[in-house]
Image (cartoon, helix red, strand yellow):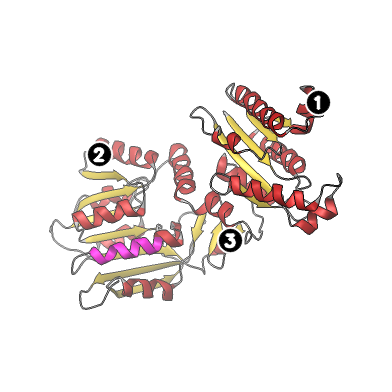
Amino acid sequence: MNIIFWVTGAPNTGKSTFSDLLSRSISQELGIEPIRLDGDSLRIVLGESDINDETNRENLAHTYLRIAKYLALQGNIVIVSAVAPFASIHKNFEDARIKIFPVLLTVNPEVAILRNQRNLDLGSWKALDAKLKSLMSDSGYIIENNSYEISEAKVCLLLEYLIVVPKTELSIDFNSNQKLLFQMSASAEAKKDYWNLHYGSSSFFSAPSTFAEFVNNKYEGAAKLRLFDIGCGDGRDSLFFSHRFETYGFDISENAISICEERAKQKKEKVKFVLIKSIEDLSNHILKLQPDIIYLRFVLHALNEYEENEFFKSLVNCKQGTKLFIETRTVLDPKFYKGLRLSENEGHDGHYRRFTKFEVLKSKLQDSGFKITTFSEGKGLSVIKDDDPSLLRVVAERDNSIDGY
């Protein structure tokens, strides 16, 4: 798999314990035996157990990295645990052939004192911890490890984002790890990875969703209105809409767009499918093409707060009369109570969701110059096998008499 986990931290932060648990989790969840390279053991193997000179320590760290890369290039997952507070090491992490994930473990100084087995001067320890945090601030994952037992939930979630493993049902507090949390679940990169995996391995639906039928029934005649299906997924609703509307399907997943294009080709349907890289990218398409209908099914609850705010800002560019159709999971949905609880309205149950509150949505629509014409909330709107979510359906229309942003 050509992967290296570079686990670092000042002494007494739990590097070896974390690396052991990470190794065990990879073995259990993925069925792959990773290779462990521990700095203390490597020094003995390399005959460098008594190095005190800073330059020699830095050279030794580069030796660790070269060994790890050599092993990773043979298709292995390698876990390196070492202090290595050197900027030159981080500059060598970028390698197109290998995925390298730096993970920093840190603790409060009081915890370090309690764990101290090497009589390390606390001032030196703090300086080392600060240096490592500075090196990792832009390129790594920082984990607070103040408990005496490393959190298995954190290891599982880290794996789920980086390599993709089965979901965990544990609930933990990530308030001290906001950057790690965002990168592992809510970032565009994390969601893109998840949906590429999803659409690379799952079968697609043939029939349109009940929400697509609901929208279609709102229109009569053959007027060729332009419809944007945002988050088109496997394309079933886009293909359905193409019978009546000039349809564009947008998604962040390359695999999803490939499926859509192949289905459209087989069915000889005229749909323009577009791969988007960001909300800003989507905003440009809204401004340029001026859709008559914007359709979002099960998309709003997949956006993080920044993405949602940017999306609503883009709606200011819509023309008078543009219709917006939204179907999204609410905080009353059963899935809200499953998996990891990330915030008051965010969860991670296999993948990230940010559950919608009607009053918040209503306010953002009004700020964007849209008025709600109809809405409904509850279960029974989109039942798929055993899943009967609590949904909010909203129809809103652009009204230039309402002040936007």
The type of residue carrying mark 3 is: Leu
Residue 123 to residue 1: above or below: below
Which of disc 3 and disc 2 is earlier in sequence?
2
Residue highlighted by disc 2: 267
Residue that sits furthest to the bottom in the current view: 401
Front residue of 205 and 78: 78
Compare marks 2 and 1 and give the one earlier in the sequence: 1
| Contact flag, marks 1 and 3 (Cβ < 8 Å) | no
Q: Is residue 382 magenta?
A: no
Closer mark to the observer between disc 2 and disc 1: 1
Determine which residue is flagged by label 1. Answer: 44
Principal SS element in the magenta part?
Answer: helix
Q: Where is residue 61 in the image (x, y as percent from the top left)?
A: 67, 31
- In percent of width and height, residue 353 lies at 50, 58
Instruction: Compute the Cα span from label 2 to label 3.
Output: 42 Å
The amino acid marked with disc number 2 is: Lys
> Is residue 56 visible to us here?
yes
The answer to whether residue 350 is left or right of residue 324 is: right
Which quarter of the rendering shows the N terminus? top right
Q: What element does badge 3 sit on?
A: loop
